[in-house]
Amino acid sequence: MKKSDLLIPLERIERTILLIRGEKVLLDRHLADLYEVKAIALRQQVKRNLDRFPTDFMFQLSKEEAENLVSQNVIPSLKVLGGSLPYAFTEQGVAMLSSVLRSKRAVQVNVEIMRAFVRLRQMISSHADLLKKIESLEKKYDAQFKQVFVAIRELMSPKPVPSGREIGFHADVDKGPKRN
């Protein structure tokens, strides 16, 4: 699918996916913007269908979590929320939203959100693969570099002179040069 065919650019959706409580989520206000509905209308539909949204599909943020999002400029202020704390929807919760928000746009937006989640998982997976490769290289080359450093240290440490007659030219400060 071409970028121009998308209802909403994937990058816009990806920017709204947050990591909260170890879950990748979208906030109700961001979803409402994407669906082009008011956040209160979205929350009302969810409340009418709470049995479709168990805690692993949706949860309400604590006041501390909401304040943290305000401090990170994810949401403008707690006042903008109208006294209610935002809801966070996991990927499964977003998928369930298409069953309670029955507009054509909601279905189309959900398809694009699912694609964004898949793309995000693929990126995370490729980063994990890259991290494994880097760690493997580090282990391999750490051992090789360790050998190099051992050799350098050996070259730098003075060797004891073997007993017996010394070879070379010595200078006595008092007597001048002396030959062996």
Image (spheres, rainbow, N blue to C red):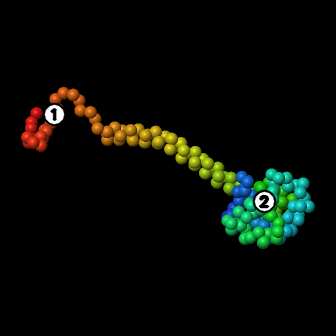
In the depicted structure, whether residue 54 falls above or below residue 27: above
Could you tell me the amino acid type at mark 2? Ser
Q: Residue furthest front?
A: 174
**Residue 139, percent from left and from top:** 51, 41
Q: Which residue is mark 2?
A: 62
**Residue 117, percent from left and from top:** 72, 56
Left-right relation of 124 to 28: left
Identify the image quadrant of the C terminus. top left
Could you tell me the amino acid type at mark 1? Ile
Left-right relation of 157 to 23: left
- Marks 1 and 2, the one that precedes in the sequence: 2
Do tag 1 and tag 2 residues touch (Cβ < 8 Å)?
no
Foreground of the two, 46 or 22: 22
Q: Which residue is mark 1?
A: 167
Name which quarter of the figure residue 37 lies in: bottom right
Q: Residue at x 8, y 40 (%)?
A: 175
Q: Residue at x 47, y 42 (%)?
A: 142
Q: How far is disc 1 from disc 2 in space, using C-alphas?
A: 82 Å
Q: Residue furthest top?
A: 164
Identify the image quadrant of the N terminus. bottom right
Name which quarter of the figure residue 179 lies in: top left
Foreground of the two, 3 or 110: 110
**Residue 161, percent from left and from top:** 23, 32
Q: Residue at x 46, y 42 (%)?
A: 141
